[in-house]
Amino acid sequence: MTQLPSDATLTESGFAEPGSGQILLIACGALAREILALKSANGWDHMVLQCLPAKYHLYPDKITDAVEDMVRKHRDAYASIFVVYADCGTGGLLQAKCDELGVEMIEGPHCYSFFEGNEAFAGRDEITVFYLTDFLVKQFDAFVWKPMGLDRHPELRDMLFGNYTKLVYQAQIEDPALRAKAEECAERLGLAYEYRFTGYGDLATALKAQA
C-alpha cells in the first residue's frame, strides 16, 4: 500500500463513489490504515473513507470544527455519516456537535480506549501509563519527540514524563519490527515497557455495527 502522509488530508480512492446507500466515514488520519484493513477484510465497499489530518492529534481544538465542515459538505451525498473519532481531547464538544448534526460517532475518550475495548480500558484505570498505537510507534519522532521539544531539549524528558511509570504499546497488528521500535521508544522516555496486542478492538465492533 502506498505510504500515507502523516499530516495530510486523505481521501480514499479505489472504492465505490459517493451515492445512494453509501456510508461516509470521517476519521482521524491516524486510523486510516486500520479502517482500510477492516474495509478490505470485510468487503465493506459501500463505506467511503475521508480522513482529516493526523496532526490534529496534537491540536484537538481543531477537530470539532473540521468534522462539522466535512459533515455539512458531504451529508447530502451519502445515506449516512459515521465519525471515527472518540472524544480525543475535545472535552465533549465533538459529541455535542455530532448530536446537533444528527450523526453518530465512535464511543470512548480516545483511540487508546477503543482499541483496547472501552470497558476493559476503563477497568484498568492506568493514570501513569503512556500509550502508543501502531501509528504512533511509526510516527514517534513526528508526534511525540519533536512536538514536545525533546529533540532540542532532551533534558525536558524527566520533567515531561516524570509522572509516568510505563509505556504500553497497543499493537493493532503483529509486527516484530514495530515491537522493537516501541521498546526503543520506552527506553528513550526512560519508562518501563509493556506490549499488548489489542487488534482493532471496539473500532472493528463500531464499524461492523454501521456496516
Image (cartoon, helix red, strand yellow):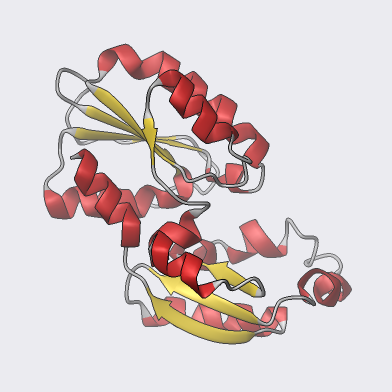
Assign the N terminus to one quadrant of the image.
Answer: bottom left
Q: Is residue 81 left or right of residue 195?
A: left
Residue 175 as seen in the image, left or right of residue 140: left
Give the quarter of the figure containing the C terminus. top left
Q: Residue 5: x percent and y percent?
A: 48, 47
Residue at 15% across, 38% down? 45
x, y percent for residue 148: 76, 60
Q: Nearer the viewer, residue 204 or 176?
A: 204
Q: Position of residue 13 (x, y in %)?
A: 27, 34
Which residue is depicted at the point 50% across and 22% down? Answer: 68
Image quarter of residue 65: top right
Q: Is residue 96 visible in the rendered structure shown here?
A: yes
Describe residue 111's horizontal placement relative to residue 1 as left or right: right
Q: Tell me what residue is drawn at x 21 percent, y 36 percent.
A: 14
Front in this rendered view, residue 62 or 51: 62
167, above or below 51, in the image: below
- Which quadrant of the structure image shows residue 78? top left
Q: Is residue 26 above or below residue 100?
A: below
What is the quadrant of residue 48 in the picture? top left
